[in-house]
Image (cartoon, rainbow, N blue to C red):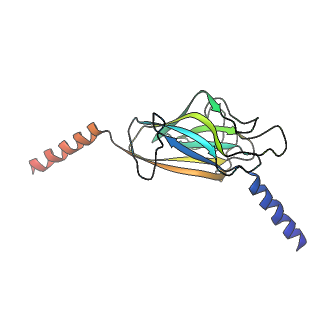
């Protein structure tokens, strides 16, 4: 019984050690984008910021990815690492596929990185950790942004997809011109009958 309690305590502490990171979306100009009430047109772009929400201590290896069928995740040449992120934090160069992250689906791509510090148990403060990441809508449909902790090492996405941190669904609609053409096509078909 004591061994079971010790195991539960160790597992509980391990899960508490992970910094809770979330995806925040912003429109050009810096206004917040609410994926529950707002939609994107094809070719619209959002800024993605990865933020900490609980200030826990510990390390994580976040991987942000999506299905390229509906959207693309990109970053500037060097993603901005903002304090209060710990001192050894950073986004790996290139995209997840460029980093040879295994386990991603054939149409999935994204970015991976590390939230870590040189000292053993630093306070991980709340606030923005990474910016200069973008999402661009490329097709009609729902794009799902997945933020997971790949925990083992940064170049292997586990078979179970990693430990989920956050998931955001972005609803995408056709451009107004496309909607107009669809409407005209519907009127044409109705007239022919």
User: What residue is rendered at 18% in x and 42% in y?
Assistant: 184
Classify residue 47 as left or right of residue 175.
Answer: right
Number of labels in the image equals: 0
Closer to us: 191 or 119 = 119
Q: Position of residue 110 (x, y in %)?
A: 58, 38
Closer to us: 165 or 125 = 125
User: What residue is rendered at 46% in x and 38% in y?
Assistant: 27
Q: Position of residue 85 (x, y in %)?
A: 70, 39
Classify residue 126 as left or right of residue 7.
Answer: left
Closer to us: 113 or 182 = 113
User: What residue is rendered at 55% in x and 44% in y?
Assistant: 24
> Which quarter of the figure has residue 128?
top right
Q: Residue lying farthest bottom?
A: 1
Q: Position of residue 10 (x, y in %)?
A: 83, 60
Where 22 sits versus 176, above or below?
Answer: below
Q: Position of residue 157 (x, y in %)?
A: 67, 45
Classify residue 25 as left or right of residue 8.
Answer: left
**Residue 29 in view of the camera:** yes
Classify residue 62 as left or right of residue 122.
Answer: left
**Quadrant that contains the N terminus:** bottom right
**Residue 67 in view of the camera:** no
Q: Residue lying farthest right?
A: 2
């Amino acid at each position: 019984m004591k061994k079971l309690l010790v195991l539960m305590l160790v597992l509980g502490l391990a899960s508490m050690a992970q910094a809770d990171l979330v995806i925040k979306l912003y429109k050009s100009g810096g206004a917040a984008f609410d994926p529950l009430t707002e939609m994107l047109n094809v070719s619209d772009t959002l800024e993605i910021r990865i933020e900490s929400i609980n200030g826990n201590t510990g390390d994580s290896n976040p991987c942000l990815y999506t299905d390229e069928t509906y959207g693309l995740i990109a970053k500037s040449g060097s993603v901005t690492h903002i304090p209060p992120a710990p001192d050894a934090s950073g986004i790996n160069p290139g995209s997840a596929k460029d980093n040879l992250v295994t386990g991603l689906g054939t149409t999935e791509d994204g970015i991976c990185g590390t939230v870590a510090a040189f000292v053993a148990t630093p306070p991980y403060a709340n606030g923005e950790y990474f910016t200069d990441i973008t999402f661009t809508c490329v097709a009609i449909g729902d794009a799902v942004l997945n933020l997971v902790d790949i925990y083992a090492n940064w170049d292997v996405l586990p078979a179970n997809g990693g430990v989920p941190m956050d998931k955001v669904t972005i609803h995408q609609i056709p451009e107004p011109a496309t909607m107009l053409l669809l409407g005209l096509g519907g009127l044409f078909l109705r007239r022919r009958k």
